[in-house]
Image (cartoon, rainbow, N blue to C red):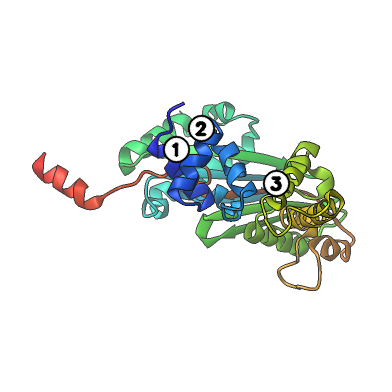
């Protein structure tokens, strides 16, 4: 299949690899960006795949708690300036209230909820018209807990990142907020290794083995030795993406799981939203835009 410049650009931004390496990877993987990303990692070409969730749009996220219900959501705008606009913030307040009151299960249900005689979909359309930028209510999650649990909510940099953690066996919201701050700063993917799909573990094991096989210093070692190295690297890799195995940011001698256990609690779940993750941002040349307006 034909490999476009846009495909190469997307893979380069995702992996940090060079342009020609990205093009070669895409050719090898029939244009599949995810497979090409893994191919680059296996060849030792790509940088750590932590750029996969890079921020590529503006707006704000928010988390809010009301008794045993919490909501976390994201609203996007075209510029960061608009995300600080009073009307935009008022829309965020309206969405927060509608989510907490109606507890919708889908985006369609949320958009159909009404406030002051208008549906949320109409309110978003109105905001787009009056603010002058496209406003999008992108995603949300409603989380419920019991009286025996605790919510931890944290909003970073005015909504650039929001995190919600649920701890079981405690009502200590301070400890729960600490865990939410950990989630916001370290971006875990799973609560623990036990929560990971086996497919994800096997995929990471395969990637680590291919990296070793492509390392000239290690490729000739016996399979048993390679297997031992792979398992060690796998454990380290999984510790970075599993919340309870991460080093606790306030006390480097503790893992998050032990910190929580010290307070007779356990991590039940978490949600983390970062503004614009996974959205390709429009590249603008303001000089060209000004000239086009003058010439137009």
Q: Which residue is mark 2?
A: 31
Residue at the image point whose x is 41% and y is 45% from the top: 281
Q: Is residue 119 visible?
A: no
Q: Which mark is residue 210?
A: 3
Residue 119 on image: x %, y %: 48, 29
Which residue ends up furthest to the front in the rendered image? Answer: 220
Task: Tell whether label 3 touches label 1 (CB within 8 Å).
Answer: no
Tell which circle, 1 or 2, labels the residue nearer the N-terminal end. 1
- Taking depth in this image into account, of 276 and 237 the one nearest to the observer is 237
Task: Tell whether label 2 touches label 3 (CB within 8 Å).
Answer: no
Residue 213 on image: x %, y %: 71, 49
Tell which circle, 1 or 3, labels the residue nearer the N-terminal end. 1
Q: Left of 29 or right of it: where is 269?
A: right
Badge 2 marks a residue whose secondary structure is loop
Residue 235 on image: x %, y %: 80, 55
Q: Residues within 10 Å of mark 3 (few under 14, many from 20)?
A: some
**Among the 4 quarters of the image, the one containing residue 170:** bottom right
- Taking depth in this image into account, of 249 and 12 the one nearest to the observer is 12
Which residue ends up furthest to the left in the rendered image? Answer: 295
Q: Which residue is mark 1?
A: 7
Quarter of the rendering occupied by the C terminus: top left
Badge 3 marks a residue whose secondary structure is helix
Task: Tell whether label 2 touches label 1 (CB within 8 Å).
Answer: yes
Q: Left of 21 or right of it: where is 219?
A: right
């Amino acid at each position: 299949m034909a490999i476009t410049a846009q495909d190469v650009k997307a893979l380069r931004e995702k992996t940090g690899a060079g342009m020609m390496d990205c093009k070669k990877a895409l050719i090898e993987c029939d244009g599949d960006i995810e497979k090409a990303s893994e191919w680059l990692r296996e060849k030792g070409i790509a940088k750590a795949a932590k750029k996969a969730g890079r921020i590529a749009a503006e707006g704000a996220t928010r988390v809010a708690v009301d008794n045993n219900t919490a909501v976390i959501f994201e609203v996007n705008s075209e510029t960061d300036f608009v995300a600080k606009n009073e009307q935009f913030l008022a829309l965020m307040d309206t969405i927060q209230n509608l989510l907490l009151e109606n507890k919708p299960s889908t985006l369609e249900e949320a958009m159909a909820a009404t406030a002051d005689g208008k549906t949320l979909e109409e309110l978003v359309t109105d905001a787009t018209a009056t603010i002058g930028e496209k406003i999008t209510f992108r995603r949300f999650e409603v989380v419920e807990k019991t009286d025996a649990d605790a919510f931890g909510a944290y909003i970073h940099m005015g909504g650039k990142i929001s995190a919600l953690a649920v701890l079981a066996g405690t009502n200590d919201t301070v400890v729960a907020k600490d865990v939410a701050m950990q989630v916001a700063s370290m971006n875990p993917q799973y609560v623990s290794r036990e929560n990971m799909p086996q497919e994800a573990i096997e995929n990471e094991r395969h990637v680590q083995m291919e990296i070793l096989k492509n390392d000239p210093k290690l490729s000739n070692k016996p399979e048993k030795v390679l297997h031992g190295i792979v398992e060690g690297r796998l454990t380290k890799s999984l510790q970075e993406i599993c919340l309870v195995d991460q080093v606790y940011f306030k006390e480097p001698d503790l893992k998050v799981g032990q910190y929580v256990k010290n307070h007779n609690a356990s991590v039940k779940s978490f949600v983390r939203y970062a503004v614009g993750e996974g959205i390709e941002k429009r590249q603008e040349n303001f000089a060209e835009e000004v000239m086009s307006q003058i010439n137009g």
